Amino acid sequence: MAVSEAELETLAAEVGRALRQRDWRLATAESCTGGWIAQVSTAIAGSSEWFERGFVTYSNAAKQEMLGVRAETLTQHGAVSEATVREMATGVLAASRAQVAVAVSGVAGPGGGTAEKPVGTVWIAWAGPAGVVATHCHFAGDRHAIRAQTVQRALEGILLQVASGS
């Protein structure tokens, strides 16, 4: 599924409108997307009203140092796991002044996949007033396509979080 930069920016603008309606701010914790969620968000004029901050925590050390992901979580489950993205999401929320946060970690390829976690495996978590929600995704395509689909799904999930008030 090809997702264009324009489509992502349109979706980010929707996120911004929804966040402004609640007077909420967004924080991001990104691994496999390398800051792309923050980039499309801040590409929107006026995003300083609703985008609070973003962390690119590509290494396990960064996940631990910046977001408080526990070493035990990474050892037991790996960076690409529900447990890790949940800790990333709660960590970025705690490290910010945002009311909602998103965290992503995945295997974008072309290498790095395993039988248990093939290329295209992505975990996304959203944190807000009602707690944390996480989802497992498997995206197809090359590295760019997998990352773009991750950004799209992350933004769609933020919209759902804001709409539900959680």
Image (spheres, rainbow, N blue to C red):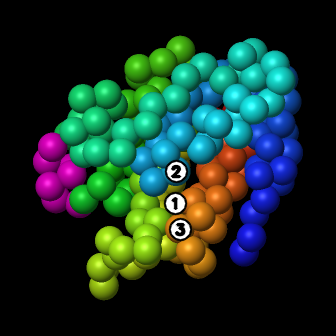
Magenta stretch: give its range.
71-77
Horizontal and vertical percent position of residue 159: 74, 43
Residue 14 image-quadrant placement: top right
Identity, as a three-letter code, of the amino acid under mark 3: Arg
Residue at the disc numbered 2: 33
Which numbered circle lies on residue 135?
Answer: 1
The image shows residue 46, relative to residue 111, as above or below, that is: above
Q: Residues within 10 Å of mark 1 (few under 14, many from 20)?
A: some
> Cα distance, mark 2 to mark 1?
16 Å
Q: Nearer the viewer, mark 2 or mark 1?
A: 2
Name the one closer to the observer, 80 or 108: 108
Residue at the disc numbered 3: 143
Horizontal and vertical percent position of residue 65: 24, 29
Q: Would you say residue 162 sits in the magenta stretch? A: no
Horizontal and vertical percent position of residue 148: 64, 59
Classify mark 1: helix, strand or loop. strand
